[in-house]
Amino acid sequence: MHTFGHGVPLDHEEGRFWLRQSALQGLTAAQINLGAIYAEGLGTDPDLVKAFAWLTLGAENSRAANQALEQVSQRIKLEDRALAEAMITELRRKTAKDRIPKVGETAH
């Protein structure tokens, strides 16, 4: 909402904060949106490392994210891709810990 000013004042920083909170809980749409924001530099400097990491996580659960991930893959430098891979590992650890259980799933 804050990212696009829907019903609240436009605030990219606040929007990224809440998207990240949702993304860390394993919400695919938030992971994809956060990746797209970093890829395009919406309200922030573009950051292909963060974009690649978040889009990779989102692509694990959504075919729609694969196209955006492919575009970032073509733009990211090899050394930055290594940073992104390390970030993906850390994000997977965090999302596994913070993820909201799905219906019928028990929390760990």
Image (cartoon, rainbow, N blue to C red):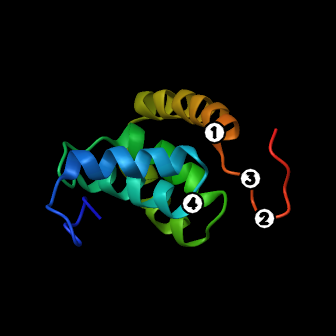
Which comes before the other along the chain, label 4 or label 3?
A: 4
* Residue labelled with disc 4: 28
Q: CA distance from mark 4 to mark 2?
A: 16 Å
Determine whether label 3 and label 2 are within 8 Å by CB. no
SS label for mark 2: loop
Left or right of 19, for residue 57: right
- Residue 58 in the image: state x and y as whole percent: 56, 57
Looking at the rendered structure, the kind of residue marked 1 is Asp
Q: Residue at x 85, y 62 (%)?
A: 104
Q: Neighbour class for label 3 at 10 Å: few (<14), some, many (≥20)?
A: few
Q: CA distance from mark 3 to mark 1?
A: 9 Å
In this view, the residue farthest toward the left is 9
Left or right of 90, for residue 103: right
* Residue labelled with disc 2: 103
Camera-nearest label, 4 or 3? 3
* Residue labelled with disc 3: 101
- Residue 64 in the image: state x and y as whole percent: 54, 72
Q: Neighbour class for label 2 at 10 Å: few (<14), some, many (≥20)?
A: few
Q: Residue at x 70, y 39 (%)?
A: 96
Q: Quick one: quadrant of the C terminus?
A: top right
* Residue labelled with disc 1: 98
Q: CA distance from mark 3 to mark 2?
A: 7 Å
Looking at the rendered structure, the kind of residue marked 2 is Val
Q: CA distance from mark 1 to mark 2?
A: 16 Å
SS label for mark 4: helix
SS label for mark 3: loop
Looking at the rendered structure, the kind of residue marked 4 is Thr
